[in-house]
């Protein structure tokens, strides 16, 4: 009797600790549950899966994954998939089911009979991550589901599970499917499988205008001479999106080629394809706003070594956003055609000559430093540094981006006078210097490319369609202020663009607007606060805005005090912004071209924070190459005239879904 009472009191104490205001107390209470069994403790674990703190949720996942009664644990987790009110709990349940793995397959297959299409999709996502061939019969059947998202999830799962049966079905969907989206998805999954696509299928798909871009994207996954031969004509494709895909895939194959044979084939093909008449079809991407495409186009154009191309490359030296890639390219040209480079550089202005010489000197200095230091940054060393940065700041580089990270690490080591990577790693691990050094390196690794009125189509959506909705909602709810956040604002151009657009409005009435800009880099925040910009920030701004809101200051332009006063800038780590009171109950969050640098786990954590920071009905605006696919189920997609935008459901929508 006494033991039962003691057990009862202990359970009551654990339940109270799970509602304690301190995160660490709740986390330790969850850890305590792994020593206990029973339905009541599973219920407490289920509650922990939905805790506000991701650390507590992560602990709950770890405990439930190793729970002795795994059948009961699986039941609890599947039930959590229905919890549309607590996105954190649902996301944690998905992670736990994936980690439990093969043991869950039979229960998940049975759970897929549910009426709820969202849960069916989640189940298929989980089965795809587990990769069990026992799920194939279900996938082959449910691929005819009435819900499009469920069908897409089934195709994705087939691609992840793989094998002859899955490949045969994917080929069938590409060749004879009626659903265009399903065909696209199946094609991309076949490309990712690593097996070359049948040449006759590629030739047939290239005749379908809608498929040329997708085919060019997929060919980049297969570094073969056949892929190169199919891609080279894509550089002159009439469709801009198809050309963009061909450029990216050729640049990717060029970088991945270890033998040099494909590099020679690409170089010869580019020089034969991009004559004076066609060169502009690739050059136009150097003036666009997609960072990776600009870098890819630069790599391909630099393969053409003549006086016109050199003159063009020299001109790009004035744009800081090209400095890393351009320095490497110019150094390579200098090694191969030093005479040509020197001759053509003499024809340039003193400003250009000085910049090019500086880039070459810096590049040679880095190469010399690496050689003298005998720096060998192997894959495991790279991953060790990358994972440290990812854990603290979310920034993540895959092995394809290793060369860029190497350059930044070399720059940092050179600056602080370290010659051995082992010494630098020791500095990162040192309790006294580690966090400060990690922060310094993180700032170097982030790309600060930005300019005024970037991604104009999205800004039109915000100004013409979203702002009227936000104003109406604020007036209806009796609020006096709208709040907008530019997350990852770099040197401030995006936040100030929003301020200028808001200055142009005449429908705000008495409503005030607060704009916040945050970035990890202290130097960038300092530039933003000064509001003084060079020519590279004005590449797409209209004359109307540049004349109305800027004053010339030598070679730069000073933003007006009125606009500068509308924005409040602060240095902040996106993974820990939750402590800020200002960044709560927001109407809109701009986080464009930031998620591309984050690990999957960091993306999920950040998107969840954004969801919590937005008021019901608030909007999340991402970069055009970013989406919430497999990151969050908490937002709905709004189809506007110029763009697709993610929106947090309103209270009425949530109530309707609940009922």
Image: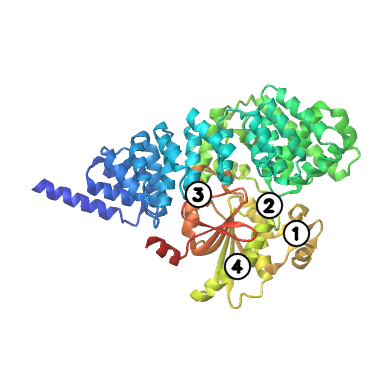
Labels 1, 2: front one = 1
- Give me the disc on residue 467: 4
Residue 344 left/right relative to 412 = right
Q: CA distance from mark 2 to mark 4?
A: 23 Å
Which image quadrant is residue 307 in?
top right
Sequence-first tag of 1 and 2: 2
Labels 2, 3: front one = 3
Q: Whole-percent x and y of residue 141?
A: 43, 40
Query: Could you tell me which secondary element the residue under label 4 belongs to?
Result: helix
For label 2, count other residues whose C-alpha is less than 10 Å away and answer few (under 14), some (14-19) or many (20+): many
Mark 2 — residue?
Answer: 450
Mark 1 — residue?
Answer: 541
Q: Whole-percent x and y of residue 621?
A: 58, 57
Q: CA distance from mark 2 to mark 3?
A: 36 Å
Of all residues, the one furthest to the left in this rendering is 1
Which image quadrant is residue 438 in?
top right
Q: CA distance from mark 4 to mark 1?
A: 21 Å
Name the residue rendered at 73%, 42% in the picture. Answer: 322
Q: CA distance from mark 1 to mark 3?
A: 40 Å
Name the residue rendered at 68%, 55% in the picture. Answer: 455
Q: Whole-percent x and y of residue 650?
A: 47, 65
Mark 3 — residue?
Answer: 148
């Amino acid at each position: 009797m006494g033991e039962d009472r003691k057990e009862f009191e202990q359970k009551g104490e654990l339940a109270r600790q799970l509602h304690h205001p301190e995160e660490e107390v709740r986390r330790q209470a969850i850890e305590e549950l792994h020593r206990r069994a029973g339905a009541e403790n599973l219920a407490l674990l289920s509650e922990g899966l939905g805790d506000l703190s991701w650390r507590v949720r992560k602990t709950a996942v770890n405990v439930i994954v190793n729970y002795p009664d795994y059948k009961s644990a699986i039941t609890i987790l599947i039930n959590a998939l229905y919890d549309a009110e607590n996105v954190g709990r649902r996301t944690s349940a998905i992670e736990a089911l994936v980690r439990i793995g093969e043991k869950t397959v039979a229960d998940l297959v049975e759970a897929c009979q549910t009426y709820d299409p969202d849960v069916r999709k989640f189940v298929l996502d989980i089965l795809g991550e587990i990769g069990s061939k026992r799920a194939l019969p279900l996938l082959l059947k449910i691929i005819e589901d009435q819900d499009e998202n469920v069908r897409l999830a089934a195709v994705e799962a087939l691609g992840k599970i793989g094998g002859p049966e899955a490949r045969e079905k994917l080929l069938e969907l590409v060749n004879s499917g009626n659903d265009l989206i399903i065909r696209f998805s199946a094609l991309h999954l076949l490309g990712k499988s690593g097996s070359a696509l049948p040449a006759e299928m590629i030739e047939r798909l290239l005749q379908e205008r809608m498929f040329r871009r997708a085919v060019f994207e997929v060919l980049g996954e297969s570094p073969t001479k056949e892929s190169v031969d199919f891609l080279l004509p894509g550089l002159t494709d009439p469709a801009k999106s198809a050309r963009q895909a061909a450029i990216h895939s050729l640049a990717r194959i060029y970088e991945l080629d270890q033998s040099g044979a494909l590099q020679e084939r690409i170089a010869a093909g580019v020089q034969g394809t991009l004559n004076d008449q066609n060169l502009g079809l690739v050059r136009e991407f150097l003036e666009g706003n997609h960072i990776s495409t600009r870098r890819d186009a630069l790599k391909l154009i630099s393969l053409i070594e003549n006086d016109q191309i050199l003159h063009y490359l020299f001109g790009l030296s004035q744009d800081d956003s090209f400095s890393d890639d351009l320095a490497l390219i110019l150094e390579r040209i200098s090694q191969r055609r030093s005479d040509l480079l020197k001759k053509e550089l003499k024809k340039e202005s003193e400003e250009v000559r000085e910049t090019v010489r500086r880039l070459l000197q810096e590049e040679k200095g880095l190469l010399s430093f690496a050689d003298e230091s005998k720096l060998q940054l192997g894959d495991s060393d790279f991953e060790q540094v990358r994972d440290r940065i990812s854990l603290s700041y979310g920034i993540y580089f895959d092995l394809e981006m290793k060369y860029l990270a190497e350059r930044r690490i070399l720059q940092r080591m050179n600056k602080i006078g370290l010659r051995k990577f082992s010494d630098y790693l020791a500095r990162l691990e040192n309790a006294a210097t580690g966090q400060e050094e990690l922060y310094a390196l993180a700032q170097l690794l982030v790309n600060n490319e930005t300019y005024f009125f970037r991604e104009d189509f999205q800004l039109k959506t915000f100004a013409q369609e979203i702002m009227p909705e936000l104003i109406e909602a604020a007036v209806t709810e009796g609020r006096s202020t709208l709040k907008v956040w530019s997350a990852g604002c770099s040197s401030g151009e995006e936040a100030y663009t929003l301020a200028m657009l808001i200055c142009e409005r005449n429908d705000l009435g008495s409503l005030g607007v607060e704009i916040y800009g945050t970035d990890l880099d202290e130097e960038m925040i300092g530039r933003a606060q000064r509001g003084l910009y060079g020519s590279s920030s004005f590449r797409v701004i209209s004359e109307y805005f540049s004349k109305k809101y800027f004053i010339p200051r030598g070679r730069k332009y000073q933003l007006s005090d009125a606009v500068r006063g509308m924005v409040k800038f602060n240095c902040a780590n996106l993974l820990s912004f939750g402590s800020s009171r200002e960044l709560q109950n927001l109407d809109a969050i701009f986080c464009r071209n930031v998620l591309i640098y984050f690990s999957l786990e960091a993306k999920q954590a950040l998107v969840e924070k954004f969801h919590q920071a937005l008021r019901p009905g608030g909007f999340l605006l991402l970069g055009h190459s970013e989406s919430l696919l497999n990151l969050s189920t908490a937002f709905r997609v709004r189809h506007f005239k110029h763009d697709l935008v993610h929106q947090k459901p309103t209270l009425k929508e949530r109530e309707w879904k609940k009922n």
